[in-house]
Image (cartoon, grey):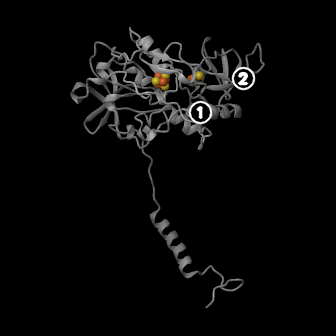
């Protein structure tokens, strides 16, 4: 079936969602997604970041859909026409959703380990307002220890449920989930039961914000100071394919490899993630490229560098000319209303 998004027509299989169709087109038309995760069944429909306008329902029923639709859970229909970035309503809605997500989110990016690779930071950069209208007190929680490898900062959580699906679908014993509802909803491990199953570390990778971070990497470095390398090892529990985040010769952090939508390509086990921090443990394949627009990309050595030309002479001469004018005041008329006395 055919679907058109922001004027780009594409042919897709029945059952494809608008978000998936947009990702097939790629580029600007792809709506942001904070809760949808293609590798996790049932994810999506929670954060409303991916809202789009359906200006034509289908060939059979061309009426527009009155409300904006969550593109990650709305299937395409044959002949459907969708507006993403081309719709002022969508732009406005994304701004509102961003503002809403930031209501309770602390602005502690300067001390948060997720800074630089945080989806909410990127979302705010693109759709955020510079001032907040929320003057009430933000939600706070009692600190909770959820195990020796994962740090939970509940006040940063946007309740996207990705980690809950990860715990459900990747581990055999579910020990953590969302308790409470509304303003009281929080990620917890029930009776503070430590998460010790072999794939629990993947919750860190799926968390779009800094609510779940790696305790072994905590406060070690800003991510943009690390050099990411693809590496692998023989592992009998997982694929063993990872990204090593190096500072000099030191492996500071190990994560799964992520694609351009910041989604894990293949989940990895805790042994690869937490227990192998020696260079000799790994076969290093080479520098990792990042397709996603992010601060990690800034000055990344895997990017082809632009040639910078500095017209030093021209600038200096221009400066000198300005100085000369200021000092000699040759452009200041000494007659006609000028109070300068000689
Ligand atoms: S802890 Fe992270 S992954 Fe889990 S619900 Fe909160 S924001 Fe989502
Ligand atoms: S990504 Fe669609 S609602 Fe969250």
Q: CA distance from mark 1 to mark 2?
A: 18 Å
Q: Residue 22, can we see it?
A: yes
Frontmost residue, 190 versus 10? 190
Nearer the observer: mark 1 or 2; the answer is 1
Position in image of residue 241 (x %, y %):
34, 21
Task: Assign a secondary structure to mark 1.
Answer: helix
Q: State whether residue 167 is above or below residue 251.
A: above
Report whether the residue tagged 2 is closer than 8 Å to ligand 2. no
**Residue 299's disc number:** none
Read off the residue under disc 1: 98
What residue appears at the point 70 percent right and 34 percent down from the top-left corner? 88
Q: Between disc 1 and disc 2, whose residue precedes?
A: 2
What residue appears at the point 52 percent right and 69 percent down from the top-left corner? 318
Position in image of residue 291 (x %, y %):
46, 32
Mark 1, Cα crowd under 10 Å, few <14 / some 14-19 / many 20+, is many
Frontmost residue, 255 versus 286? 255
Mark 2, Cα crowd under 10 Å, few <14 / some 14-19 / many 20+, is few
Q: State whether residue 82 is above or below residue 236.
A: below
Quadrant of the rendering where the N terminus is positioned: top right
Task: Assign a secondary structure to mark 2.
Answer: loop
Read off the residue under disc 2: 67
Q: Is residue 269 left or right of residue 160?
A: left
Q: State whether residue 298 is above or below residue 215.
A: below
In which quadrant of the rendered view does residue 6 lie? top right
Position in image of residue 276 (x %, y %):
25, 24
Frontmost residue, 332 versus 231? 332
What residue appears at the point 55 percent right and 37 percent down from the top-left corner? 124
Frontmost residue, 71 versus 27? 71
List the single residue furthest toward the top: 172
């Amino acid at each position: 079936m055919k679907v058109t998004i922001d004027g780009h027509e594409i042919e897709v299989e029945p059952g494809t969602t608008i978000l998936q169709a947009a990702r097939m087109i790629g580029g600007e038309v792809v709506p942001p997604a904070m809760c949808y995760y293609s590798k996790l069944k049932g994810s999506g429909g929670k954060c409303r970041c991916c809202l789009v306008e359906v200006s034509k329902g289908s060939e059979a029923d061309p009426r527009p859909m009155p409300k904006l639709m969550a593109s990650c859970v709305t299937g395409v229909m044959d002949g459907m026409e969708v507006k993403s970035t081309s719709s002022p309503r969508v732009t406005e809605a994304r701004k509102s959703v961003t503002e809403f997500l930031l209501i309770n989110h602390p602005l502690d990016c300067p001390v948060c380990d997720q800074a630089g690779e945080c989806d909410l930071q990127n979302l705010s950069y693109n759709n955020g307002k510079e001032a907040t209208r929320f003057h009430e007190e933000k939600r706070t929680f009692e600190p909770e220890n959820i195990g020796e490898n994962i740090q939970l900062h509940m006040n940063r959580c946007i309740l996207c449920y990705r980690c809950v699906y990860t715990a459900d679908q990747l581990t055999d014993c579910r020990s953590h989930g969302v308790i409470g509802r509304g303003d009281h909803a929080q990620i917890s491990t029930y009776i503070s039961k430590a998460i010790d199953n072999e794939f629990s570390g993947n919750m860190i990778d799926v968390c779009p914000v800094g609510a779940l971070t790696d305790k072994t990497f905590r406060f070690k470095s800003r991510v943009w100071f690390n050099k990411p390398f693809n590496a692998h090892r023989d592992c009998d529990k997982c694929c063993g394919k990872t990204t090593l985040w190096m500072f000099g010769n030191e492996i500071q952090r190990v994560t799964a490899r992520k694609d351009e939508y910041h989604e894990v390509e293949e989940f990895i086990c805790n042994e690869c993630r937490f227990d192998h921090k020696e260079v000799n443990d790994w076969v290093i394949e080479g520098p990792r490229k990042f397709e996603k627009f992010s601060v990690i990309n800034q000055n990344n050595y895997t990017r082809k560098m632009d040639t910078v030309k500095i017209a030093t002479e021209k600038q200096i001469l221009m400066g000198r000319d300005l100085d000369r004018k200021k000092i000699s005041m040759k452009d200041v008329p000494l007659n006609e209303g000028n109070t300068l006395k000689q």
